[in-house]
Image (cartoon, grey):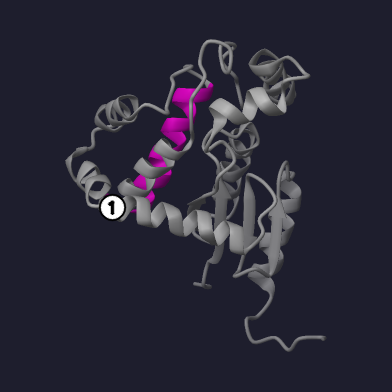
Amino acid sequence: MATPVVIDYYSDILCVWAWIAQRRNEELNDKLLGKIEWRYHYLDIFGDASNKIPNQWQDKGGFTGFSKHIQKAAAPYPDAPINTELWKSVRPNSSANPHLVLKGIELTLGANVSIELALLFRQAFFMDGKDISHLAVLFGLIEKAGYSVDEVKKSIDDGSSIAALMADYQQAKLLSLKGSPTYIIDNGRQVLYGNVGYRVLLANIEEQLKTPVNEASWC
């Protein structure tokens, strides 16, 4: 079996475009079963959401204007439902806590569980209108999914989770990533970000799958 194409996937858990991208990622998994290896990373878009949104949207309605914006952005995508209270009554202070917990899950329960729970956290926010900036909410979601939070809490307490998260944030800055989500395919051969269509993603991945690793460069 051919070596799978590695996708380093950078996103912010509170980003509506990453929520919209979720269905495309699932479709890629279904289409290219076993041919993709996802590596989840996080970048800082809403790390200071409590100040960023009212400041950047002060002339466009503040939190209410931003809420309308994400409702409009997601409207063409029925697979990405949005709770009407997001950024109205539900205003997470920061995406850093869910990112921190997800890195802790990755370190203690494994990468696949972290990917699974990243989706659960997104669903809790975008669909159920839960404020996932609260650790208690996040720990409750982990336990509801059938996992123990004890080791995850230890990784937060001893600093290993924050170290892993800072490594993600710093790498995103080093790579000058421009938005969420960003797909880095096969060690940087292709970098795609934002609202990228499914067929564009599929074409790029399939091209990598059929191109031999040792093929001579035309440069």
Horizontal relation, residue 65 to residue 5: left or right? right
Which of the 4 image quarters holds residue 152? Answer: top left
| Residue 98 pos. (x, y %) | 41, 37
> Residue 197 in the image: x percent, y percent?
74, 44
The residue positioned 61% from the left and 26% from the top of the image is 80
Q: Quadrant of residue 209?
A: bottom right
Magenta part of the chain? 109-126
Label 1 packing within 10 angstroms: few (<14), some (14-19), many (20+)? few
In the rendered structure, the answer to whether residue 34 lies left or right of residue 19 reads left
Is 49 positioned to the left or the right of 140 in the image?
Answer: right
Judge whether 152 appears above or below 72 on screen: below
Magenta span: predominant SS is helix
The kind of secondary structure element at disc 1 is loop
Give the number of marks: 1
Q: Could you tell me the amino acid type at mark 1?
A: Gly
Can see residue 55? yes
Which residue matches tag 1?
159
Q: Residue at x 56, y 51 (%)?
A: 10
Horizontal and vertical percent position of residue 149: 22, 38
What residue is drawn where x is 44% and y is 24%?
A: 124
Q: Nearer the viewer, residue 162 or 209?
A: 162
Residue 39 appears in the rendering: no
| Residue closer to the observer: 5 or 156 | 156
Give the camera-side residue of 53 and 138: 53
Look at the image and say whether residue 119 sits in the magenta stretch.
Answer: yes
**Residue 11 figure quarter:** top right
Instruction: Answer with left or right where residue 157 lies relative to residue 92.
Output: left
Quick check: is 166 in the magenta stretch? no
Looking at the figure, which quarter contains the C terminus? Answer: bottom right
When the figure is inspected, residue 8 is found, relative to residue 63, above or below; the finding is: below
In percent of width and height, residue 3 lies at: 51, 72
